[in-house]
Amino acid sequence: MSSSTPYPAAWTRTDVSEGLGLGSLLAEPCGYRLEAGEAVAADGERFFARFTIRTDLAWTTREVRVEAVTVTGPESVRLTARDGRWSDARGCPLPELMGCLDVDVAATPLTSTLPIRRLGLRPGEHREIAVARIDIPSLTVSRMRRSYTRHPARGGLERYTYRDPIHGEYEFSVDTDGVVVDYERFARRVRPGP
């Protein structure tokens, strides 16, 4: 993977009055690593979240570690996955996540890169998938159905529609690495200075 994105990429949250995130996408010998953090101080909510995700070379999630700091203190969750079978930090199986190949850490647009890269959709193609979703800041883990549709590129960016039964439909654009640039009603990439 040869990156054209200056890392770490930075996003301002558009769904809250004060929120900022940073994230990097790194190639490793056996796959990829996503590193990101998000801080929100808005609407009576204050938290910081940091995560690391490791994938294989096909962009299938293998390991996730998420830490959140809230007014009640720090908490963390760690999950591992092999062939769609998930377990927690103690090695206990999580059968409700069976078959999920991607993880979504709810506080950041960076995890949208995982299904975008793994699915490799062509313009006009659509796919429904199940993901392991980690809510931020509660760190609650659940299974969520969602769909992705790829649209023709516009303005040098690839475009997608994301849909799930709880949050509805969002359009977003990604750069050549599959990293979000603009995510409707959620986040917008901060452009690097001169």
Image (cartoon, helix red, strand yellow):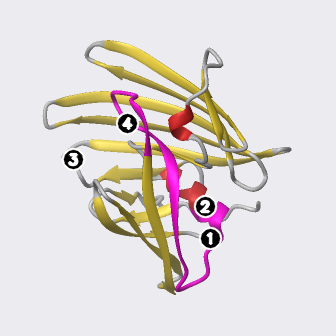
Q: Earlier in the sequence, mark 3 or mark 2?
A: 2
Distance of mark 1 from mark 3, alpha carbons? Answer: 27 Å
Amino acid type at circle 3 is Val
Quadrant of residue 138 within the rendered picture: top left
Element type where label 4 sits in the image: loop
Using the rendered image of the protein, determine whether residue 177 is visible from the camera's viewpoint. no
User: Picture coordinates of residue 174 (x, y %)?
Assistant: 51, 68
Residue plotted at (13% across, 31% down) = 44
**Crowdedness near tag 1: few (<14), some (14–19) or many (≥20) residues, C-alpha within 10 Å:** few
Residue on which the image places disc 4: 135
Q: Which residues are magenta?
A: 116-143
Residue on which the image places disc 3: 16
Residue on which the image places disc 2: 5
Distance of mark 3 from mark 2, alpha carbons? Answer: 25 Å
Residue on which the image places disc 1: 176
Residue 31 shown left or right of residue 86 in the figure: right
Q: Nearer the viewer, mark 4 or mark 3?
A: 4
